[in-house]
Amino acid sequence: MSRLRIYDETQPHSPSIDTLDHAAIARELGRVGVRFEQWEATQPIVPGASQEEVIAAYRGDIDRLMDEKGYQAVDVISLVPDHPDRATLRQKFLSEHTHSEDEVRFFVAGSGQFTLHIDGKVYDILCEQGDLIGVPDGTRHWFDMSESPYFVAIRLFTNKDGWVANFTGDDIAGQFPRMQPNVRT
């Protein structure tokens, strides 16, 4: 179940908001310019589906966002608990960073935790199957996939070269809760 916890940046153990309500999550994130939507496939997706099949199942929503926001590239990333580079990949995303373009992820399966640092608050969002999150360019954030990652996500990019991080050097990410091991959804 999707979850949003909002903290004061100085209170990493006491969220002021903790909700599982999708409409409330979308509303709270919308207040700070973050897109949060639910998508449904237009055709069944079977385990082991190719990148092309996954993209085809969500083509209408992908095209809508590409037209609206000018995204130039789309791909699918998949990570499983026994991936040999899971620890290295996890560590890469755990430090606070920004991007010069929006970070847009749609969770086809599994889950991941985006944590955003905006105007003295920390927004901790557990995204699950069916959730799309659009983090605006320049937003300080980090991402946790847990020690035992499981997710399939569609990624949209403005830059055809894909994901480029600009690390802030702030250690705030280490002060807030990490994602618990994934349960397949």
Image: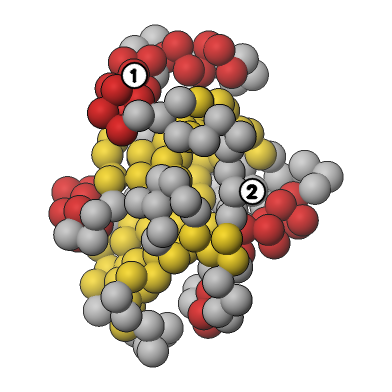
Q: Which mark is residue 1?
A: none
Q: Which residue is mark 2?
A: 149
Q: Which residue is mark 1?
A: 63
Within-10-Å neighbours for mark 1: few <14, some 14–19, many 20+: some
Residue 16 position in % (x across, y down):
25, 79
Nearest to the observer: residue 14 or residue 52: 52
Residue drawn where x is 66% and y is 39% of the image: 79
Residue 145 position in % (x across, y down):
59, 53
Q: Nearer the viewer, mark 2 or mark 1?
A: 1
* 105 sits left or right of 171 in the view: left
Nearest to the observer: residue 47 or residue 133: 133
Image position of 75 with respect to 119: above or below? above
Image position of 151 with respect to 59: above or below? below
Residue 61 position in % (x across, y down):
31, 22
Q: Secondary structure at mark 1?
A: helix
Residue drawn where x is 37% and y is 34% of the image: 130
Which amino acid is tagged 2? Pro
Which amino acid is tagged 1? Asp
For the question of whether residue 181 can be seen, the reply is no
Residue 30 position in % (x across, y down):
20, 53
Q: Secondary structure at mark 2?
A: loop
Q: Gap in Å between the C-alphas at discs 2 and 1? A: 28 Å
